[in-house]
Image (cartoon, helix red, strand yellow):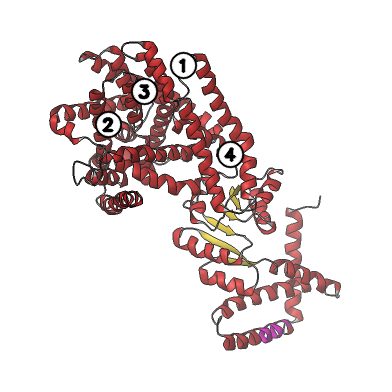
Amino acid sequence: MFSSVFSQAFIYLLAAVLAVPLARKLGLGSALGYLLAGVAIGPFVFGFIGPEGQDVMHFAEFGVVLMLFLVGLELEPRVLWRMRVPILGLGGSQVVITGSVVGVAAWYFGLPWQTALAIGLILALSSTAIVLQTLNEKSWMNTAAGRAGFSVLLFQDIAVIPVLALLPFLALGSAGAGIDAAATHGAEPGLAGWLRGLMVLGVVAGIVIGGRFLMRPAFHWIASTRSLELFIATALTLIVGITLAMEFVGLSPALGTFLAGVVLAESEFRHELESNIEPFKGLLLGLFFISVGASIDFGIVAGQPLLVLGLVLALIISKFLVLLVLGKIFRLNLADNLKFAFLLAQGGEFAFLLFSFATQNRVISSELSNLLVVVVVLTMMLTPLLIIVYERFVRPRFIDCVSAPADEQIDAGPSPVIIAGYGRFGQVVSRLLSADGIKTTLLDHDSSQIELTGRFGYKVFFGDASRLQLLQAAGADEARLLVIAIDEWDKAVEMVASAKKFFPQLKILARAFDRSHAYRLMEAGADIITRETFGSALILGEEALKLLGYDEARAYRLMRTFKQHDEEGLQKLYEVWGDDKEYGLRVRQNIEQLEKVLKDDSEESVQDFREAWQQLRGAESRRFPEG
């Protein structure tokens, strides 16, 4: 048993490792690479995967569920409300018009109206997995076409619920039998319709209320254990639990997890959840695409090649034209409109679930269902090729009218400054920047500190900022500054080195605990280093000089001279750090030079400085008057 499981896992992983890099190098995109890998190992090419590939696909569909959860995390409820017009207007129009066009065509060619309506609604849906992956890979999410495409996909995912609810009532034959079959999809058969409706409302309300009032305290408690493994297990338990609950009432698990993501989007655990779930999502989505490729029944293609080709072209062209018209109505310029149409002119992965459900309810025959599944898979496989056609032949003709990414993103957008560590040091930096209107993203892994600061209105996200995934989720790709103010010495050094490597545009400001830690941070590549007690010690030393009889100007000058000399000496001493003999010699020379500088400070220079200092104090008093 174990050898069979491991051999199948090896085949899937090896196919992905070989096909995806090759596909991306050829400019085909990773989605098409996964699909081609599935075709290669499927029963109609090398035959490494047999009927068990269907079981793998059912498992891999969980990748779509995880993807919708992450999409929900990116959408705060207020942002979702702001997008209501494109979601309902553009998305709703696309589903209704495309469904009507396809349904009328199916009815015209002799299918019963119930079957035609079901086919129209199912084929109106596009591939959330392929389109979102394409938008992210090509950084199109923040373009006009990307936002329009996302709105349509969001409405389509929501539309799966009413489609699932409608299919049992379209059953050919006994309607009652169809409704009973719908009950077996999730809840217990024989339940009254109103009772199943209450169950649906109860599950949805449970997700919203539980996510808002129960999950945040639960995540606080889990975070207090400082166990990353336990946090990941809790996140996966939440998603699997929602999936089971949605399946029990016969609804789309993807919609349930999307709703949970939206509820948790304003949580301080948002970035940590995103960084933890992302690897699972990527792996399972790849597995899903491979399974889709392996599931293509080339026997149907070989038996009816012209019919299959005609249906594929008809679906792509009809959806393309509908999208093009809607884009024009919703005022997309021609270049963005073409991109929008090319992106969404395919069938979607929910078709596998809906066609299967429609077959169970005797709405569509199994032969027709198998044919249409092959058509949907082929349109999904052609999408990356359509994108290549757009990029190489269409976009260059409209390069002057391609809209630049908008300032307003689907999310509120990344902050220019990320502060890792919101303790006594990071708080001061954050408050100074915030006082001047500079937005900061705050990260800390102490759940009690997060809870405490939350009472005062400060939003701190939970997570270990030394992890690259969390920094990326927090917007490090687009931020300008990274302030490292964490307590762990070694982690601070690791953060500087990794951030410098993976986010080269970031300027890194790091907090050092002492001289040796400063040297290590300099070696790792930090741009600016501040020893945490150095500044406060200088201020205290200046006050001590005043109490010893020095006037204010003299004490301030001595402090500034000492600070400048020490900072210059820090850089010089770093050059011989590690050589104990040479380092000790340089330290003694540095001390002697400092004593000489302070001793040679003449009264004339003191007087000159006193006058300049008084002018500075006068300017400060005018800028910051007392009271």
> Residue 556 in the image: x percent, y percent?
75, 70
Q: Nearer the viewer, residue 549 or 327?
A: 327
Left or right: 526 with respect to 146? Answer: right
Label 1 sits on residue: 190
At x 59%, y 52%, the residue is 443
The mark nearer the N terminus, 1 or 3, is: 3
Marks 3/2 in contact by CB < 8 Å: the verdict is no
The segment highlighted magenta reads 591-598
Rendered position, 450 above or below 590: above
Pick the front one: 93 or 370? 370
Q: Amino acid at mark 4?
A: Glu
- Residue 123 drawn in magenta: no
**Quadrant position of residue 269:** top right
Please, is residue 196 above or below residue 618 in the view? above
Find disc 4 in the rendering and name its residue: 266
The answer to whether one can see residue 609 in this image is: yes
Write down the residue under mark 3: 95
Badge 1 or badge 2: first in the primary sequence: 1
**Residue that appears at 44% across and 20% down:** 183
